[in-house]
Amino acid sequence: MPAITYIEFDGTEYHVDVAVGNSVMEGALNNMIDGIVAECGGSCVCCTCHCMIDPEWSEVVGEANDEENELLEMLDVREPTSRLSCQVQVTDEMDGMVVRLPESQY
Amino acid sequence: MEVDDHVVIIGASHAAVQLMISLRQQGWLGAITTISDEPHMPYQRPPLSKSYLDGSVEADRLVLRAAETYDKLKVDFKLGCKVTSIDARNKQLNLDTGEKIGFTKLALCTGARVRQLDLPGSELEGVHYLRTMDDVKAIRQSAKKASRAVIIGGGYIGLETAASLTKLGIKVTVLETETRLLKRVASEQVSEFYKRLHEEEGVEIRLGSKVVALQGNSQVKSVVCDDDSHSGADMVIIGVGVIPNTELASEAGLVVENGIVVDQFAQTSHPDIVAAGDCTFHPNALLKKSLRLESVPNASEQAKAAAASLCGIKKAYSELPWFWSDQFDVKLQIAGISQGYTKAVVRGDASAGRSFSVFYIKDQYVIAADCINRPKDFMVAKKLILQQSKIDVAALVDESSEIKKLLINGEQ
């Protein structure tokens, strides 16, 4: 399983294995990583699973889709590599990827 | 908080899962047991009437958390058994298996059940309600051999089901007793839109139709309304709302109104019992009233407060309610509760196309919004409601003006 590192806003790091086909959001939820709230459970409607992909990995992950972009656009803090983690499906190529989590999901 | 302490959770859905996670995060050291009358590990309910019903998602993708997560949480699941009573004085639960389970603290996440219609013929094969995964498994089975379906009830569940069955190639008729769809929860503009949407997609909508009987031999064949009309059907789905599961609580002497009464800390009238989710009647400081919600975000956020209470921490729960619904290619996002609005204004064109928002205004303040394929409007609406400043309606409905500018710090 690909290993993914989640870094919370306060610097806490989680190194976890996430099954291929699961989303980056599910990886966080299954490992009780608090920085992802995911109120809607992964339907791309609530914008509470925001994460910033480490720039080194942004090409592997790709860009946000249109629907996701509209939500991301309204965030107070958006970075060039911001994604909604429910929309990022984990692949073998993401082994070793680093994602950072924002201070707040609201 | 002692190692010997034992939290028992009744229920194993969205509220229960968040509650057990939050308990461990807050440092609960004792045992946690969760009891559910369903045989399944916790699963997501919102997709049941949407992607799970139309087959685009299968059961294995509905799990709320991976099995290993529950191992890490050290939670003991007792599935497929029912709590028959709560002995609050002796802090003990009686199960339908005859077993008795003692608790130090108890969490009621009992949710809600479908409201049943007392109709002649409702026992016929092919007649369904929709609340659980097993309900939808049965609906999917019926759908395999059905060419016509009748949905009784034009609320969100009924309409989502109509959309999902239409995707499966079934000809759907929706029967609604009221004069418009979604009457209890939405403005006329939104009701009209959903009628148009469904009709454009080939669904027949019949308003003011009160069902009096279901007919067939062993298998349902038709639905009879009070005007004596018959609608042919190979399957029928009844979606006429839910009733909170409060009986265990009231029999145990807890205060119950339209839901189990809790305070902002999810505490019931019993000091060792909390409650969270669809079953609770709770105060909301933002809305300045008590209410009961049927909502996953509510269940999860209230469960966090409930877990904190059990750990002796005061964490008030007060969130702006929000909801969503997927039907065909339309994503509806609802912010706030529109009840009591004095004016509904539209941004965009409600009469054509599939993208607009209705803002509900009370005394010059935005109190709620229904956003149809407009995620940006939804995000702004949440902030507009929370910022509680008088709204410039002309700017709100002016599509040539960026909606973001209406926010107090919108120019940033």
Image (cartoon, rainbow, N blue to C red):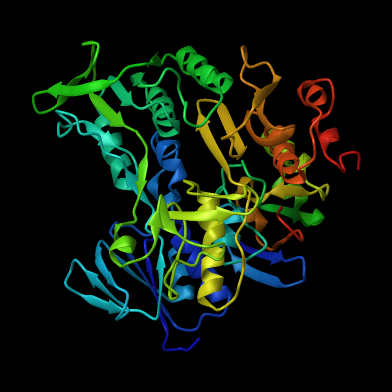
Relative to B104, B336 lies left or right: right
Relative to A94, A53 lies left or right: right
Image coordinates of residue B396 in percent, x first then y, are 78, 26
Residue A21 visible somewhere in the drawing: no
Q: Quadrant of residue A72?
A: top right
Residue B397 visible somewhere in the drawing: yes
User: What residue sits 23% from the left and 77% below the top?
Assistant: B100
Camera-side residue of B371 and B202: B371
Image coordinates of residue B86 in percent, x first then y, are 29, 70
Camera-side residue of B27 and B140: B27
Q: Quadrant of residue B269?
A: bottom left
Furthest-right residue in view?
Answer: B412
Camera-side residue of B345 and B297: B345
Q: Quadrant of residue B49?
A: top left
Furthest-left residue in view?
Answer: B217
User: What residue sits 32% from the left and 61% below the top?
Assistant: B250
Camera-side residue of A45 and B370: B370
Image coordinates of residue B131 in percent, x first then y, are 35, 43
Q: Is residue B104 above or below residue A96?
A: below
- Locate the C terminus of chain B and report the quarter of the image it occupies: top right
Q: How many marks?
A: 0
Relative to B210, B324 lies left or right: right
Image coordinates of residue B30 in percent, x first then y, are 45, 83
